[in-house]
Image (cartoon, grey):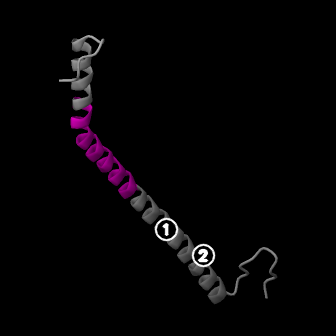
Amino acid sequence: MADPTSVNSQITDSVTEVNTKVLGDAPAVAMGTLSQQLAISTGLVYQNAVAAQQQVNVMALAALNQGVSQILGTPTTAGEVPR
């Protein structure tokens, strides 16, 4: 117990118990925060993978369009004149 002071002993005991509870809860709170951050990071990884895959698909379609246009001999840009 704390040294005798002019503060009521019930108050000092209450503060001591609350401090002990906070220290006891800290590991659980830290692990909960870690789990949340891991879930957020994993979600961002998947979002980035989907965005990259979409960009690759856009580029593949553009390349396919260019190739087909060259095979058929059609213009591929607005300013180009057909032969």
Question: In front here: 73 or 18?
Answer: 18
| Residue under pointer 1 | 52
Question: On the rendered structure, is 10 left or right of 53?
Answer: left
The span shown in magenta is: 21-43
Q: Residue at x 49, y 68 (%)?
A: 52
Question: On the rendered structure, is 23 left or right of 76?
Answer: left
Picture coordinates of residue 35, whole percent (x, y): 29, 49
Picture coordinates of residue 56, whole percent (x, y): 51, 73
Q: Can you name the residue that lies furthest to the left here?
A: 1
Q: Which image quadrant: the C terminus?
A: bottom right
Task: Write down the quadrant of residue 11 in the picture.
Answer: top left
Instruction: Tell me the kind of residue under disc 1.
Output: Ala
| Residue under pointer 2 | 62
53, above or below 6, in the image: below
Q: Main secondary structure of the magenta part?
A: helix
Question: Helix or strand or loop: what does disc 1 sit on?
Answer: helix
Q: Residue at x 58, y 80 (%)?
A: 63
Other-residue count near label 2 (Cα within 10 Å), few / some / many at <14 / 14–19 / ≥20: few
Question: In front here: 35 or 47?
Answer: 35
Q: Residue at x 63, y 81 (%)?
A: 66
